[in-house]
Amino acid sequence: MGNPARGTRAPLLAAGLYASLLFPPEFSVNVGTLRLSSYRLVLLFAMPILLLKLLSGRSIRPHAVDYLIIAHAFWAMLALIVYAGPVDGVESGGIFVIETLGAYLVARMSITNADQYRAIVPTGLSIIRFSTASSPRRRLRPCTTCWGTNVSGWAPSAGWASFS
């Protein structure tokens, strides 16, 4: 096992996706009725490349779970097309595929060992810390009994969900 402080860096694509989550919704591109925010743009451009890389089997051998995630994304898109009609179904189902399958592929293809995982966790925690510190309504408080167990963690404060 390696220590992330000894040279293992966070995967660039996963860190870039984390960083794209920091941009506010005002930094988005409207294409017709579709709003493409920064994280959606990252996923939109990365997903086809990562999907082809996974299915080619050269860098990482695909497993049954990979095929099940792909099937789930496209099955949900098909269900939305049947439920909402072709126009609205393709729009909402397409975004679902991009957000679900794209995020899965970024993690699956970028984080391939325990050292890379250990390197990306502080990046994610830094993003959470930065985004919650910027708003006084999103302060976090210590929680010693999360999910009914006696663990040390963080939980949202009481006023976190109210954005009046």
Image (tube, grey):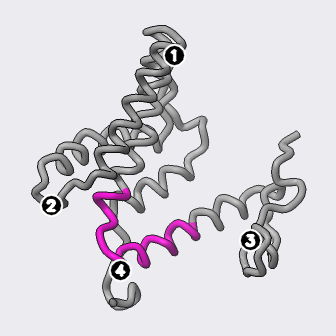
Alpha carbon distance from label 4 to label 2: 18 Å
Residue named by callout 1? 33
Q: Which amino acid does label 1 sit on?
A: Thr
Q: In which quarter of the image is the N terminus?
A: bottom left
Residue at which label 2 appears? 59
- For the residues labelled 1 and 2, the Cα–Cα distance comes to 37 Å
Asked if 158 appears above or below 24 in the picture, the reply is below
Q: Name the residue under label 4.
A: 115
Expressed as whole percent of the image width and height from the top left, the position of residue 112 reads 29, 68
Residue 48 located left or right of residue 161: left
Q: Which of marks 1 and 2 is in front?
A: 2
Is there a contact, CB below 8 Å, between mark 3 and mark 4? no
Residue type indicated by callout 4: Asp
In the visual, does 26 lie left or right of 149? left
Residue 32 drawn at (x, y percent): 47, 15
Disc 3 crowd, CA 10 A, few/some/many (<14, 14-19, 20+): few
Indicate which disc, 2 or 3, sits on the residue closer to the N terminus.
2
- The stretch of residues the image draws in magenta is 107-126
Contact, mark 1 vs mark 2 (Cβ under 8 Å): no
Residue at screen point 49% across, 72% down: 121
Q: What kind of residue is marked 2?
A: Ser
Element type where label 1 sits in the image? loop
Kindly identify which residue carries mark 3.
154
Circle 3: residue type: Trp
